[in-house]
Amino acid sequence: MQANCYVLARGDGQPCVIVDPGQEAGPALAEQLLEHALTPAAVLLTHGHFDHVFSAGEICREHGVPAWIHPDDRYMLADPGAALGPAGRQLFGGGLSMPAPTDVRDLADGDRLEQAGIAFEVVHTPGHTGGSVLFRTGTDEGGRLVLSGDTLFAGAIGRTDLPGGDHARMLHSLSTKVLALDDDTAVLPGHGPTTTIGRERVSNPFLQDLPEAAEQPPGR
């Protein structure tokens, strides 16, 4: 499914955080861990779709680390086909199985996680799924970084037509959470190339002319 998996560490020989280990992530991840002498400390999941979590259970069990996910998407770890809908399930012969992590911990909007010596802020951005989140962090030099999952891509946004998706909530998340980020924030998306908030603010057609944000998310 060509999803992006990220490994973050403060340097070689350090603990690391793995973000969104999808299908076939294991071999490439093992190479990175060996090359840089990294030790996994946690797996962070931007949402529950199987192309982002497929290898999470295997990696968590192998290294004895927890997986962090928003509770609204936790059900997909046990039933990866739940978000595909009937047509999507048929693509996989009616079934899709994967090992689920044994130690799963909940994320909440505004949480600050300290993992592998790196501080992350959790930003809940429902729309692509009910439990989609961004992970905000930075560098020692002052750079800003956000791992956006399938909420924001370079030139696009995540689809909202799968079970659990909600277009109105997506627009609200984009206008109140994504566009609130500084323009110099580097964006590491769930699919495709990296970008910046500033670039997307002026060029992403899905961010143009967004309605003025309501005080409460639609449907809540």
Image (tube, helix red, strand yellow):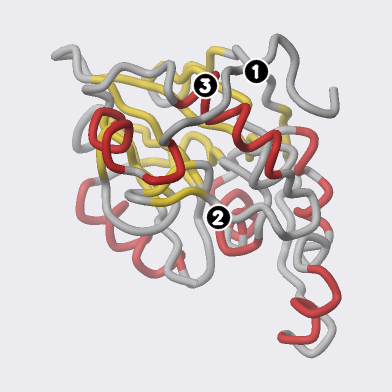
Q: Nearer the viewer, mark 2 or mark 1?
A: 1
Does the CB distance between marks 2 and 3 fall below 8 Å? no
Q: Residues within 10 Å of mark 2 (few under 14, many from 20)?
A: many
The residue shown at (37%, 36%) is: 16
The residue labelled by disc 3 is 177
The residue shown at (41%, 54%) is: 5
The residue labelled by disc 2 is 59
| Mark positioned earlier in the residue sequence (3 or 1) | 1
Q: Quadrant of residue 79?
A: bottom right
2 vs 158: above or below: below
Name the amino acid, label 2.
Answer: Ile
Name the amino acid, label 3.
Answer: Lys
Toward the viewer: 146 or 161?
161
Toward the viewer: 52 or 170?
170
Toward the viewer: 193 or 141?
193
Q: Which quarter shows the C terminus?
A: top right
